[in-house]
């Protein structure tokens, strides 16, 4: 999985991120984000070692969500960097309307599963939707899961207050993933049963974890990875527009968000988290530090496990070279997408190799 080079750097498969709402000041939930902006955001993720990702569209008005997917599909087809967009993740709108589980998603656009809307999404996305996050608490959710999984889409449980029975029905219908487990939840839960324990205990569900040191405490993260099993644990960023940018105010869909000085992304004027400012290379370092994983184990969460959970089509020549610093940070040196050099930290920004 990870190879030590004679220079003292390491090489591994490129990182795979299943959940990216935006990056480098660019919002994937804005249908008028330009091709240049999207390309710039992808190059910023190459600098973090990412080679395949799922741009993520969150809960919004029906026409806006379709327009965002259409814009991303156009970028995927037109940009030389677009090959890295392995598909799209739709997070919502079929989530819990309840405060807490709903997270930062706008309540007014939460709605029940609709096969017709799924068809419209896929048409807008050029058939490239690969993951849908939904809550099994909705009537008809199990039938909807059967419908989308029959078409090769991963059904992921998230932003939910579903009962044990509803989660079991979702898994029986074909759900195979939990979206950022431990987040998108009530502040207070009954000890047992609850929807986090039920998902942790279900061996047929893989689980994504946001390892930024903010969304999850070290003790929960360590216990959750042990309970789920390393082979079912996936590192995700849930990166929002400000990730890879300077502190300040940004837009995520039609909501104002702020990146604070301590690295939190919150709905403007509140303390409610709205995604993260995490990059994948920092996530790899964080999961070693917080969960006590080895480098190989952390890289596995960011590569092999992520690709398997999201059914990501990776290339054998998707690679990243990085250094592990004395402080335990992961510093990306070079990134290759399908054998093409996409980032080289030894070159100046102006001298970076263009994608052809």
Image: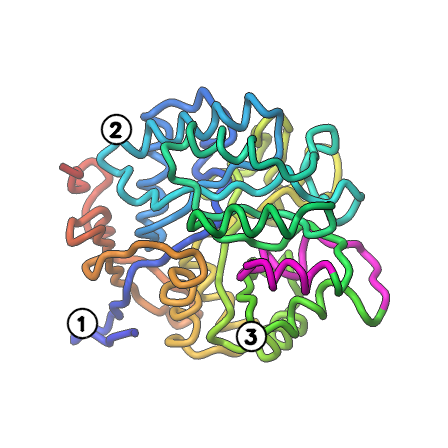
Answer few, some or many: residues within 10 Å of disc 1's Cα (few below 14, many 20 plus, some between 14 and 19).
Answer: few
Q: Which residue matches tag 1?
A: 7
Provide the residue span drawn in magenta: 166-190
Residue 270 in sight here: yes
Q: Secondary structure at mark 1?
A: loop
Q: Earlier in the sequence, mark 1 or mark 3?
A: 1
The colour mode here is rainbow
Q: Nearer the viewer, mark 1 or mark 3?
A: 3
331 horizontally vs 287: left or right: left
The foreground one among 235 and 151 is: 151
Would you identify the image quadrant in which residue 223 lies?
bottom right
Image quadrant in which the N terminus is located:
bottom left
Q: Nearer the viewer, mark 2 or mark 3?
A: 2
Residue 233: horizontal and vertical position, in percent? 51, 69
Would you identify the image quadrant in which residue 256 lies?
top right
Residue 147: horizontal and vertical position, in percent? 53, 47
Answer few, some or many: residues within 10 Å of disc 3's Cα (few below 14, many 20 plus, some between 14 and 19).
Answer: many
Q: Nearer the viewer, mark 1 or mark 2?
A: 2
Q: Residue at x 68, y 44 (%)?
A: 95
Residue 52: horizontal and vertical position, in percent? 33, 50
- Magenta portion: prevailing SS class: loop
- For residue 43, above or below residue 252: below
Is 18 part of what is drawn in magenta?
Answer: no
Q: Which residue matches tag 2?
A: 78
Spatial separation of the CA atoms under disc 1 and disc 2: 37 Å
- Residue 43, numbered label: none
215 horizontally vs 244: left or right: right
- Residue 291, numbered label: 3
Spatial separation of the CA atoms under disc 2 and disc 3: 40 Å
């Amino acid at each position: 999985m990870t190879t030590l080079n004679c220079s003292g750097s390491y090489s591994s498969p490129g990182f795979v991120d299943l959940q990216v709402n935006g990056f480098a000041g660019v919002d994937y939930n804005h249908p008028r984000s330009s091709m240049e902006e999207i390309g710039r955001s992808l190059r910023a993720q190459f600098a973090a070692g990412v080679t395949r990702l799922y741009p993520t569209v969150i809960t919004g008005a029906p026409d806006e969500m379709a327009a965002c997917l259409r814009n991303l599909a156009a970028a995927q087809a037109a940009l030389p960097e677009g090959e890295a967009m392995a598909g799209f993740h739709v997070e919502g709108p079929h989530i819990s309307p309840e405060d807490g589980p709903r997270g930062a998603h706008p309540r007014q656009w939460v709605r029940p599963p609709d096969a017709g809307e799924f068809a419209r999404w896929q048409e807008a996305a050029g058939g490239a939707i690969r993951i849908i996050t939904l809550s099994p608490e909705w009537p008809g959710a199990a039938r909807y899961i059967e419908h989308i999984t029959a078409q090769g889409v991963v059904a992921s449980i998230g932003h939910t207050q579903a009962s044990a029975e509803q989660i079991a029905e979702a898994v029986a219908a074909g759900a195979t993933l939990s979206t950022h487990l431990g987040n998108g939840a009530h502040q207070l839960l009954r000890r047992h049963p609850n929807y986090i324990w039920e998902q942790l205990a279900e061996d047929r569900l893989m689980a994504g974890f946001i390892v930024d040191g903010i969304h999850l405490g070290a003790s929960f993260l360590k216990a959750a990875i042990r309970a789920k099993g390393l082979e079912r644990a996936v590192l995700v960023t849930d990166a929002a527009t400000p990730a890879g940018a300077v502190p300040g105010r940004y837009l995520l869909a039609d909501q104002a968000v702020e990146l604070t000085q301590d690295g939190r992304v919150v709905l403007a004027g509140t303390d409610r988290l709205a995604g993260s400012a995490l990059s994948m290379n920092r996530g790899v370092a964080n999961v070693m530090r917080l969960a006590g994983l080895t480098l190989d184990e952390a890289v596995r969460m960011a590569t092999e496990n992520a690709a398997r959970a999201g059914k990501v089509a990776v290339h054998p020549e998707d690679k990243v070279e990085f250094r592990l610093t004395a402080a335990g940070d992961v510093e990306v040196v070079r990134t290759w997408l399908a054998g093409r050099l996409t980032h080289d930290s030894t070159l100046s920004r102006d001298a970076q190799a263009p994608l052809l």
